[in-house]
Image (cartoon, helix red, strand yellow):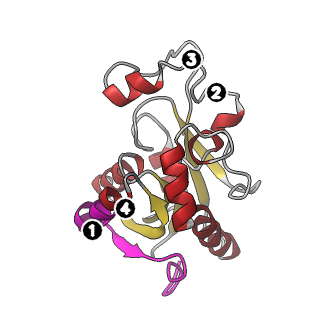
Amino acid sequence: MERTAVLVMEMQRGVVGDVARFPELVAVCDKRRVVANAAEVLRGARSAGVPVIHCTAAFRADRRGSHTRNSPFLAHLLKDPGHMLEGTAAVEVLPELWEPGDLESRRHHGFSPFTGTSLDMTLRSLDVTRVVAVGVSLNLGVQGLAIEAVNLGYQVTVVVDAVAGIPDDYAQAVLDHTIGLLATRVTAARVWEGGR
C-alpha cells in the first residue's frame, strides 16, 4: 500500500518570507499564490494523517560543515556573512505553513534535501513510498528533490501551483520538460484525489 509524505522545500522566512533576500522569487510566489496553495496542500495532508516534513537550509556563522566554494551561486550568497544563519529568523519555516506536529529535515550544504541529511531514513521509518513536493525553487531545490527521490525509489508528485522558480518562463519549462519526466504533476485542488 502506498504511504505518502509531503516535503516542503525551503519555505523559510529568509527565502520567501518577511526577511527574504530574493525579491524576484518572492514576487513570483506572490503572483502564483504559492504559499496559499502550499497551505491548502498541508491542510489536506494533516487532516488525512499524512506526515509533513519541512526541508530547510541553514549555515553556521563559521560555515563549518558546509561546502561554500563549490558553486558560483553559493559563493555569491555567502558573501553576506548573515545569510541564512542557524538560530536566526531567516531559517524559520513560514508561520502559516508550520504546525507543531510537523517534522523538519535541515541541511547545511548543497541544494537538495536528501544528500547529507536523514530525510531518506525518516521517510523509510514512516513507510513512505510516495512524496508530494511543494516549495522553492524549481531552479535547484525542487528539481533536486525530484531527481533524488526518484533515484531512491520514491514515487514523486509535484504540486504545480505550489512551486515556483525564476524567471517564471524558465520555471514553467522545468515543469514541462524536467519535472514531467520524473513526477506526476497536479494542482493543489487535486493533489488528494484518489488517495493519500
Q: Position of residue 114 (x, y in %)?
A: 42, 43
Q: Residues within 10 Å of mark 2 (few under 14, many from 20)?
A: some
> Pointers 3 and 1 in contact (CB under 8 A)?
no
At label 2, the amino acid type is Glu
Q: Is residue 8 among what the camera can see?
A: no
* Among the two numbered marks 3 and 1 on one chain, the one whose residue lies closer to the N terminus: 3
**Which residue does the numbered mark 3 point to in the structure image?**
81
The reply, left or right, for residue 153 in relation to residue 190 is left
> Pointers 3 and 4 in contact (CB under 8 A)?
no
**Which residue does the numbered mark 4 point to in the structure image?**
154
**Which residue does the numbered mark 1 point to in the structure image?**
176
* Among the two numbered marks 4 and 1 on one chain, the one whose residue lies closer to the N terminus: 4
For marks 2 and 1, give the CA distance. 35 Å
* Among the two numbered marks 2 and 1 on one chain, the one whose residue lies closer to the N terminus: 2
For marks 2 and 3, give the CA distance. 12 Å
User: Residue drawn 27% across and 68% down?
Assistant: 176
Q: Position of residue 154 (x, y in %)?
A: 37, 61
User: Residue drawn 36% across and 46% down?
Assistant: 140
For marks 3 and 4, give the CA distance. 36 Å
Q: Residue furthest top?
A: 62
> Pointers 2 and 4 in contact (CB under 8 A)?
no
Q: Position of residue 145 (x, y in %)?
A: 39, 51
Q: Position of residue 178 (x, y in %)?
A: 25, 61
